[in-house]
Amino acid sequence: MKLAWQNIIHDRARFSVTVLGVCFAVFLMIFQGSLLAGFLRAASRLIDASDSDIWITSRGVQAFEFGTILESRVREMAAGVPGVVETGRVCMAFAVYRTPNGTQQVVALVGADPNVGKRFPVPNAPESAGETSPEAVLYDVSDRKQMEVSSLPAEVEINRHRASIEREIEGYGAFLGVPFLFTSYRNATRDMGFGPEDAMYILLRVSDGHAVSDVQQTLKQRLPEVDVLTQGEFAHKSRMYWTMKTGAGGAILTAAVLAFLIGLVVVSQTIYANTMENIEEYATLKALGASQTFVARIVLAQALICGVLGSILGLLAAIPSIGYAKSLIPWIYAPWWLPAVMVIPSLFMCSLASIASVRGALTVEPGRVFRA
Amino acid sequence: MPDHFLGVQQASISFGKGEARVPALRSVSLSFERGTLALVMGPSGSGKTTLLSMLGCLLSPDEGTVFVDGVTVNQLTEPEKTAIRQKKISFVFQAFRLFHSLTALDNVAVGFEIRDPDKPQRMEMARDLLLQFGLGDKLHQEPNELSPGEKQRVAIARALAGNPPILLADEPTASLDVKAGRNICEILRNQVSEHGRTVVVVSHDPRWREFADRTITLCDGQVDQEVKNS
């Protein structure tokens, strides 16, 4: 395999171009993968943050951001179904926010009962009791500049109602380009102009002795005019809406596929050129008795060497870049496994890129070695 | 089946298509005895290299047979022919055909890697071979740093890796000066006299007559003359 290594490093300019091509492809794949992972996570972030087993929504709601008012009796009927131990409410609506400086902008106001989940950003939630008042408003630290809040607490207006921003949270930054504000359910319905018993989403917890699917079936029978979804189903529906139906996920995925194709073309071009340049040497190997496997291994090894080195460089470039991008795109997210997993398509890409070269090396006539 | 170590029997082959088809060898029968050096001469286009390609299992005749170590090889599959080359036959070329990115030592080690893949001490064996050919100070030089004579000695060392019994050489001295050429003649003769290898040399170079046991002259794809040298 020394021949494989020596052959590729002998032409350093070409070797560098190949490695940089792979590096670029891996970088883009990881970056686009992080955008997609972050997009998927952000699309269902608030649903995932609840501790509920079942979500009840109006019929046909595609994503958390598009809920409509449910009849108040739905909550009462759901609470009466055997196995339901707790109900909670969540609502969301776009509202006009007036900054302390007097400027106005649109925000997404989310209100929730304190029992919807420990991770759900609600003022006065059990773990944050004492830190904020029940009527407090929270916002994500990544939206600080947009909210124009210089110190906390800050007095602001939401839909012409006074509100007090009291705490910054993390991980719930603007997903639609509109900042999220979180407050109590009572506060939110008042600011949105809803009735105190109105609900947009009803969240249910099922007792340990009952199967979630059984309770879901009963609810569907008793409440045929609404959608009854498990938490996972609603999260999936929301993610699919944002990625597939809006085309945003498709665009990100397309960029990742394009990165793969760019890498494929760069590697195949350079490995093929290298193989053809050294085709006489492959003929010599075959004349000397090298098997087809031996010859194929050399070409494949060249492609994989470029793949491994390019992947390492791509990883080294992508990790700090994603860290930097977080300040611009708060929802970008690189799970720990993503860079490792991206090495697989990059090696696959290099193997695929070597097919034409392997074919060229395998079909060369060994008899050509006699031509001077 | 003829009981010969290496040779061709009534071998014919043509190249090209239709009216452009040209016979390269016409019913040639030749056998090469074990432990001899045979010189094949003849004008350009007489079929010398075609004969060498057949003997090296790189080309199959349209008609007739090729035998290596008693086995008729033109009926074998490509992997079987490759296995025969790997175990029994090696080549020396006019253009040396060294691997340009490897040092002399690595070039010879590749020969061992192909023919003796299970032996881990291929670098030591490659070094020993190069030392035998007086290239101890050139072990780590790449081909472009070697003189033509040195390149050919490295090529011969690579050809001898794995100890093949048959060595086929195509114009091995054509690119060399008189002194280097004579050195190569002596080396190949020595492979016959001391190691019992069978060497077939195709050459225009009349100096080879002095080292060959037999001289065969081809003309227009046929054997024109066969002379045993004393």
Image: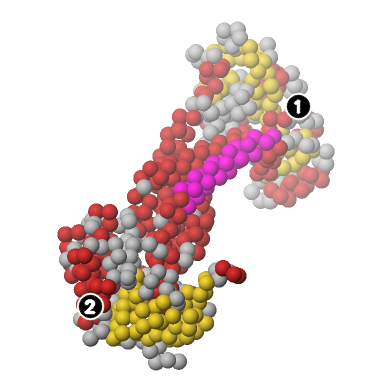
Given the image, on which type of amino acid does mark 2 rest?
Glu
Residue A106 seen in render: yes
Give, as a three-letter code, the residue at label 1. Answer: Asp
Position of A301 with respect to A81 (left or right) is: left
Indicate left or right for B64 with A247 as reference.
Answer: left
How far across and down, in percent of the image, does residue A296 sit? 45, 62
Q: Secondary structure at mark 2?
A: helix
Q: Position of residue B73 (x, y in %)?
A: 45, 82
Q: In front: mark 1 or mark 2?
A: 2
Pointer 1 residue:
A198
**Mark 1 → mark 2, Cα distance in angstroms:** 111 Å
Q: Residue at x 49, y 26 (%)?
A: A327
List the residue tagged with mark 2: B210
Co-location on one chain, circles 1 and 2: no
- Residue sitting at x 31%, y 84%: B227
Magenta part of the chain: A246-272
Nearest to the observer: residue B207 or residue B129:
B207
